[in-house]
Image (cartoon, helix red, strand yellow):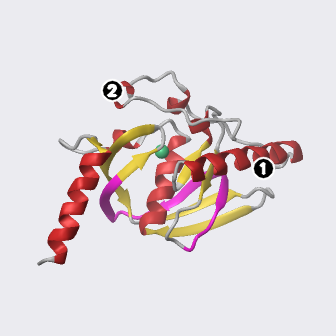
Amino acid sequence: MSALSVVTIDSDLLTLMDIVLRQEAREIQVDDADSLTLCQKLAVEMFELMYLSDGAGLAAPQVGIPIRLVVVDPSNLDFGPHVLINPTIQFKSETEEAANEGCLSIPRRVGRVFRSTEVVVHAYNLKGMLEEYSATGWLARVFQHEIEHLNGVLYPDRLRGNESLIVTEKAMRRKAEKTVKGLIK
Ligand code: ZN
């Protein structure tokens, strides 16, 4: 059992600014062997939690640790598991698309969020080496969502106009109805 647990926030309390989820996370010293060892230990705990909760990504502030580390392993994509240390978005396409997003820190809610369809991200890996990732579609969305966690930004901050968070069950019901409608058209 992981020594950590996911920090969650009720969707009515999102404006609370002085909690770990709302902080600017600290950079990790990637040229220091001890910090990389700590990152490896933390990554084990975080992957475990992420897999248990069926998430596509998890950022360190979500387990109460305000440092710039993210783990991702989006299922259905052949990207595989990655740890991003001190990730930065180098490029963001102007083209955006909207999709429903959820977050392990905001249980039982989803919201429709516009994200760039393409991003280029620089991040250090667990060996302290700089990597570049070009991502499109869902993976680009996961990167943007997770990296914003490091800046204290949560996806509901991105809702536009009169969009609001909806209860997951309701959203899934709508999706299921739309699916069946599509099948009998
Ligand atoms: Zn999240």
- The circle drawn on residue 145 is none
Q: Nearer the viewer, residue 131 or 3?
A: 3
Callout 2: SS: helix
- Looking at the image, residue 80 sits to the left or right of residue 157; the answer is right
Range of residues picked out in magenta: 78-100
Q: Quadrant of the N terminus?
A: top right
In the rendered view, would you say 140 is above or below 14? below
Q: Nearer the viewer, residue 164 or 133?
A: 164
Q: Residue at x 54, y 56 (%)?
A: 89
Q: Quadrant of the C terminus?
A: bottom left
- Residue holding disc 2: 12
Callout 1: SS: helix
Rendering quarter of residue 177: bottom left
Q: Amino acid at mark 2?
A: Asp
In the rendered view, would you say 2 is above or below 93? above
- The circle drawn on residue 40 is 1
In the rendered view, would you say 104 is above or below 64? below
Q: Residue at x 81, y 48 (%)?
A: 36
- Looking at the image, residue 84 sits to the left or right of residue 32; the answer is left
